[in-house]
């Protein structure tokens, strides 16, 4: 595996942890809905971050830098 594949796995793990953290917070909010006050800006921000994470995951890792020496699997100089 080259640097590109390792970077893709690392980014996937970090994004997976972020989605898990958001889902855990949402489930705690739903579970404790009697004692927690719902705040619309916080809910919108959470949905915004979740959508951002899901959209970023669809983008290829290193994107336009794939041809650079950092992301290529060629020999280093």
Image: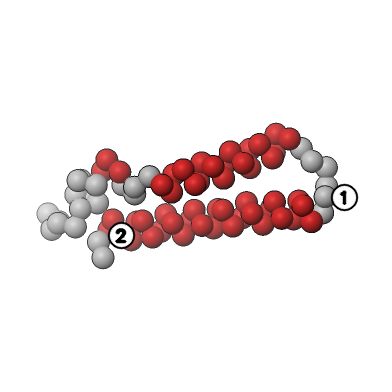
Q: Residues within 10 Å of mark 2 (few under 14, many from 20)?
A: few
Q: Position of residue 17 (x, y in %)?
A: 54, 58
Q: Quadrant of residue 49?
A: top right
Q: Residues within 10 Å of mark 1 (few under 14, many from 20)?
A: few
Disc nearer the start of the sequence (1/2): 2
Q: Is residue 67 left or right of residue 28?
A: left
Residue at image point 51% right, 57% down: 16
Residue at image point 27% right, 58% down: 3
- Above or below residue 30? Residue 51 is above
- Above or below residue 58? Residue 20 is below
Residue at image point 14% right, 56% down: 74
Q: Which residue is denoted by mark 1 in the rendering?
A: 34
- Above or below residue 53? Residue 7 is below
Query: Most extreme residue toward the bottom, as rendered?
Result: 1
Q: Is residue 68 left or right of residue 24?
A: left
Q: Position of residue 61 (x, y in %)?
A: 34, 49
Query: Most extreme residue toward the right, as rendered?
Result: 34
Q: Is disc 1 placed on a helix, strand or loop?
A: loop
Q: Quadrant of residue 1?
A: bottom left
Q: Is disc 2 placed on a helix, strand or loop?
A: helix
Q: Which residue is denoted by mark 2 in the rendering?
A: 5
Q: Is residue 20 left or right of residue 39?
A: left
Q: Nearer the viewer, mark 1 or mark 2?
A: 1
């Amino acid at each position: 595996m080259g640097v590109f594949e390792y970077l893709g796995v690392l980014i996937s793990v970090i994004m997976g942890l972020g989605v898990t953290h958001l889902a855990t917070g949402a489930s705690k909010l739903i579970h404790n809905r009697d004692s927690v006050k719902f705040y619309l800006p916080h809910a919108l921000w959470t949905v915004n971050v979740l959508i951002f994470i899901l959209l970023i995951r669809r983008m290829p890792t290193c994107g336009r830098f794939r041809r650079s020496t950092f992301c290529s699997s060629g020999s280093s100089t």
